[in-house]
Image (cartoon, rainbow, N blue to C red):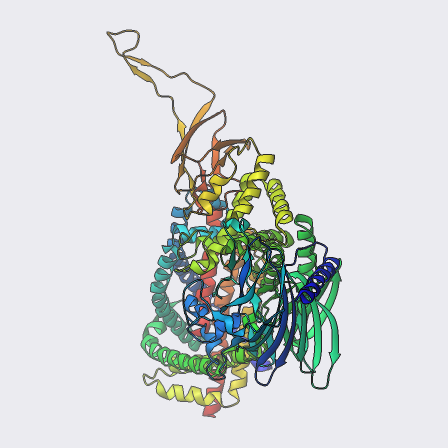
């Protein structure tokens, strides 16, 4: 036993060293997976053998381990995956019953390093919802506990039935995509980690939304596939050997939280080198032309995040654009591998490929390197990623057309996020820090993605981009290859704000997060009125108590205006006010935004042209920009022009009807 | 081809000669458009009022403005569309009347630039052409329904497709077939309209049969060519609009001229077709 353990520890160290050599940042990989898997394309099955070594990161003695068996989410309609989201989308489900496209995963045998067979000690558990039909988590009791900081070795034999066109994974025709496909250990969280008071296993069932939370591991992945199949995988290709009936491909991926792969005989591959990174693009031949759109976008993303966060540390990045019948796997992030979606009928002005590839690449930082918990705190990766997506794409293209630029219709990424959140059926449906599986009444996308991004955008507006960039750098540096939670980010924000803006926000930014992260209130400020103050004559008894007097007001060159602002929403934020005068000069004012209303006087020898709240649109959470300004003498030229143009368009439409009648 | 071009040029000459009719049709078209636009503009003005964002409304597409406007006044577009839908049947009646009047005036082959025969022809044949329009619309709807069925009922599940080029090709093919069929149907419809106003018969079914027969003989190509030239001109007009959309004033002038040109084109097309009908009738008598 001692010998085997020693060998395992040496192997772990070697693997860690190997990982360090390959990647530029050093991670503390807690586990090593050596997976050998055979793809049976006839029976649509995977046969796997996995050797795992895992180091107990705590001071606790641990007598059980937990595994995810994600494929069991696709076992039948009763799993939690489907109970959460109702049912499989129609377009995915049409052929499932015809071809029995359901999937499953089963641990056939599990041995510890002493050769003890633990197979009979495994039991399905449902830590989230007690749904006994859900088999996506399994607990395995150990014969002997794992001592603090020591390492255990386990060997698993397992089989998986590959589902047909299930969300994010499965096969269709000759396209195979394997995501969340192998038995994977849960995360043991020692006391103190992510706010835990005592050590515990964190291993959620597979839900419809939110996938990731895993230890950093080193993976050696060996796949046996038919000769004509080409494999695209996480990590770097180490070896490819032909055997009698199959080809064996070996990949190595170190310091990652997951591995994913795809296989098809129809794949074509294009490779470019950017900096020290090998970018591998896999698609079907009819989509080859899209490669340059992906490569040029990724080159920009790599450089942008290198400058703003840190260099991408892995030697490879694989991009897969699946064929149309593999659409269900598109637009997903996996460590060192991302999938996108493009259609040949999308015109170039429809920037879906650029948007997706940017979004999924950012996930390499927030989800993969900074490995927050996607089920428990989805905003920490989806929200962060959506915020960075807008920053990158608005820089790459233009703030007004980074998402769509087609026939005069332009939509920017940042403004799209705001609209998705505010135009959702109920923007107050849940707070940002809601768990992915607890958006019972919807709103996961608008809140976890879009509102989070808008909230971060507003934070940036309040504290300035320079401080925000310092926050991102410190947060990333502190938490890369670790598992932070929300409070860790807030702590970094408070530290940086105390350092750079002590006078502006002496109390830190907790007040902000309390309102926007944990609350559902809305933000809306408005200019209620701008009135010229007319000094009226004084009338009544003054010096002479016998006679009424009328005292004329003193003529003055100066004019006084009374500006009234309203806070219509519940969120209280400090705001800037800009007053523009007839001679073009502008004056700025501030309001702490806490009262329901605010009035101030403006005195000038010029008339006021307009008053604008938040002229730089720092408060991106403001739900109505229309009431943020008031013009004293509105110029209707623009509306007249719009009216003329609109009338002319209607004239053409009416005339076009004559083509039919 | 020479003949077709000659008819078409004569058609244009007739349209220019009848500039009063062109102006009348333009004026009515403008009134309908202005009437349809007014509630939307009023609503925008009441919502944006004295906001600075009002200044952005003509500066190009502003997604944030539209999004905030939609949220601040969610009923704006709904009210507008319900108003526009209410206006459409009235415009439909006017279209039938004006096209009938135009066909009648063209069938008179006189060069007097008055509107007398337009009004009288429109009134006299309105109900007959309305009936014909109903048949035509029913046929058009049935045809579109069948094409949609054929196009999208077999294999719309994208997960069954090898690649999306199949969808693209299918869409192109379907669009091509639809345009050609609408094109033929419309030609027959116009042909039939002219036959009705020329003969003065109240029994229109006989003319529908004649027009349908005409579609399967040599006239088809000539008629189609006349129509095709019209369509190309329309496409060029749209291209011109796109090219001149930078300056407000220029856009207004160009748009006005283009609407006028499109109305003249419609008249020229009917007049050209009338010459063709006339010639084929003469040939039939011989």
Instruction: Name the outermost residue toward the bottom.
Output: B286
- Number of on-image labels: 0
Residue closer to the observer: A204 or A315: A204
Q: Residue B58, can we see it?
A: no
Quadrant housing residue B132: bottom left
Quadrant housing residue A632: top left
Vertical comparison of A346 with B275: above or below: above
Residue A152 % position (x, y):
62, 64
Residue A520 % position (x, y):
41, 48
Q: Residue A534, can we see it?
A: yes
Vertical comparison of A611 with A156: above or below: above
Which quadrant is home to the N terminus of chain A?
A: bottom right
Residue closer to the observer: B123 or A300: A300
Instruction: Name the outermost residue toward the left.
Output: A546
Q: Residue at x 53, y 75 (%)?
A: A105
Which quadrant is home to the C terminus of chain A?
A: bottom left
Residue closer to the observer: A17 or B129: A17
Q: Is residue A539 left or right of residue A120?
A: left
Residue B281 % position (x, y):
46, 87
Quadrant housing residue A565: top left
Q: Is residue B45 left or right of residue A396?
A: left
Residue A420 % position (x, y):
47, 56
Residue closer to the observer: A244 or B129: A244
């Amino acid at each position: 036993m001692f010998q085997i353990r020693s060998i395992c520890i040496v192997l772990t160290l070697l693997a860690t060293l190997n990982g360090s050599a390959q990647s530029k940042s050093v991670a503390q990989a807690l586990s090593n997976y050596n997976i050998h898997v055979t793809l049976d394309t006839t029976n649509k099955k995977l046969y796997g053998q996995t050797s795992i070594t895992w180091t107990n990161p705590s001071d606790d003695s641990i007598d059980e381990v937990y595994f995810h068996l994600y494929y069991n989410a696709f076992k039948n309609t009763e799993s939690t995956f489907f109970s959460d989201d109702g049912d499989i989308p129609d377009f995915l489900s049409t052929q499932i019953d015809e071809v029995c496209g359901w999937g499953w995963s089963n641990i056939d045998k599990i041995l510890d390093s002493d050769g003890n067979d633990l197979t009979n000690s495994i039991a399905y558990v449902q830590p989230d919802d007690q749904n006994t039909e859900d088999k996506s988590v399994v607990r395995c009791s150990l014969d002997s506990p794992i001592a603090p900081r020591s390492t255990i070795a386990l060997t698993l034999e397992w089989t998986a039935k590959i589902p047909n066109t299930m969300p994010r994974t499965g096969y269709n025709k000759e396209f195979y995509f394997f995501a969340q496909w192998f038995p994977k250990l849960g995360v043991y969280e020692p006391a103190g980690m992510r706010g835990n008071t005592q050590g515990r296993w964190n291993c959620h069932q597979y839900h419809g939304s939110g996938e990731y939370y895993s230890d950093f591991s080193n993976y050696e992945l060996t796949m046996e596939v038919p000769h004509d199949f080409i494999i695209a995988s996480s990590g770097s290709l180490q070896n490819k050997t032909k055997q009698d009936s199959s080809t064996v491909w070996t990949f190595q991926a170190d310091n990652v939280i997951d591995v994913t792969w795809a296989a098809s005989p129809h794949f074509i591959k294009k490779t470019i080198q950017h900096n020290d990174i090998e970018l591998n693009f896999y698609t079907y031949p009819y989509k080859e032309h899209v490669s340059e759109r992906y490569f040029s976008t990724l080159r920009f993303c790599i450089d942008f995040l290198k400058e703003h966060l840190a260099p991408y540390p892995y030697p490879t990045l694989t991009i897969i654009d699946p064929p149309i019948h593999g659409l269900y796997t598109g637009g997903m992030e996996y460590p060192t591998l991302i999938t996108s979606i493009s259609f040949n009928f999308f015109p170039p002005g429809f920037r879906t490929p650029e948007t997706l590839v940017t979004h999924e690449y950012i996930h390499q930082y927030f989800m993969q390197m900074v490995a927050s918990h996607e089920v428990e705190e989805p905003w920490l990766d989806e929200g962060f990623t959506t915020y960075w997506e807008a920053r990158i794409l608005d820089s790459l293209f233009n703030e007004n057309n980074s998402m769509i630029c087609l026939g005069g219709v332009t939509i920017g990424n940042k403004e799209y996020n705001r609209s998705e959140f505010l135009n959702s059926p109920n923007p107050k449906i849940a707070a940002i820090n809601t768990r992915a599986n607890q958006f019972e009444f919807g709103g996961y996308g608008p809140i976890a993605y879009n509102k989070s991004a808008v909230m971060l955008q507003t934070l940036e507006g309040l504290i300035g981009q320079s401080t925000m960039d310092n926050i991102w750098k410190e947060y990333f540096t502190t938490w890369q290859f670790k598992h932070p939670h929300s409070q860790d980010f807030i702590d970094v924000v408070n530290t940086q704000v105390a350092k750079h803006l002590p006078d502006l926000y002496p109390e830190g930014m907790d007040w902000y997060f309390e309102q926007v992260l944990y609350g559902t209130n809305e933000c809306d400020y408005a200019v209620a009125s701008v009135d010229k103050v007319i000094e009226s004559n004084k009338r009544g008894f003054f010096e002479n108590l016998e006679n009424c007097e009328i005292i004329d007001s003193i003529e003055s060159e100066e004019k006084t205006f009374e500006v009234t602002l309203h806070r219509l929403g519940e969120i209280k934020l400090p705001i800037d006010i800009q007053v523009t005068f007839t001679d073009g000069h502008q004056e700025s004012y501030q309001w702490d935004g806490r009262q329901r209303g605010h009035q101030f006087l403006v005195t000038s020898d010029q008339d006021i042209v307009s008053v604008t709240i938040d002229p730089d649109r720092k408060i991106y959470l403001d739900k109505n920009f229309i009431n943020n300004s008031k013009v004293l003498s509105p110029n209707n030229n623009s509306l007249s022009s719009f009216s003329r143009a609109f009338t002319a368009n209607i004239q053409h439409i009416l005339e076009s009807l004559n083509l039919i009648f | 081809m020479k003949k077709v071009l000659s008819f078409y040029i004569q058609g244009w000459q007739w349209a220019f000669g009848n500039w009063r009719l062109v102006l009348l049709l333009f004026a009515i078209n403008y009134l309908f458009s202005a009437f349809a636009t007014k509630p939307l503009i009023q609503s925008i003005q009441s919502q944006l009022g004295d906001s600075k964002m009002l200044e952005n409304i003509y500066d190009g597409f502003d997604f944030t403005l539209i999004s905030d406007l939609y949220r601040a006044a969610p009923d704006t577009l709904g009210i507008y569309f319900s108003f526009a839908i209410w206006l459409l049947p009235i415009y439909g009646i006017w279209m039938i009347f004006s096209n009938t009047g135009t066909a009648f005036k063209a069938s008179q082959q006189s060069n007097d630039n008055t509107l007398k025969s337009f009004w009288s022809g429109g009134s006299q044949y309105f109900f007959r052409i309305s009936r014909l329009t109903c048949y035509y619309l029913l046929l058009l709807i049935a045809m579109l329904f069948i094409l949609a069925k054929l196009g999208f009922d077999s294999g719309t599940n994208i997960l069954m497709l090898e690649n999306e080029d199949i969808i693209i090709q299918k869409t192109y093919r379907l669009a091509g077939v639809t345009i050609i069929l609408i094109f033929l149907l419309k030609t027959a419809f116009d042909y039939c309209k002219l036959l009705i106003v020329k003969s003065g018969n109240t029994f229109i079914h006989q003319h529908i049969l004649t027009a349908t027969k005409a579609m399967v003989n040599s006239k088809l190509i000539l008629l189609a060519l006349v129509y095709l030239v019209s369509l190309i001109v329309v496409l060029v007009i749209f291209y011109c609009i796109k090219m001149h959309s930078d300056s407000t004033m220029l856009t207004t002038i160009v748009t006005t001229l283009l609407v006028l040109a499109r109305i003249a084109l419609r008249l020229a097309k009917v007049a050209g077709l009338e010459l063709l009908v006339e010639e084929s009738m003469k040939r039939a008598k011989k």
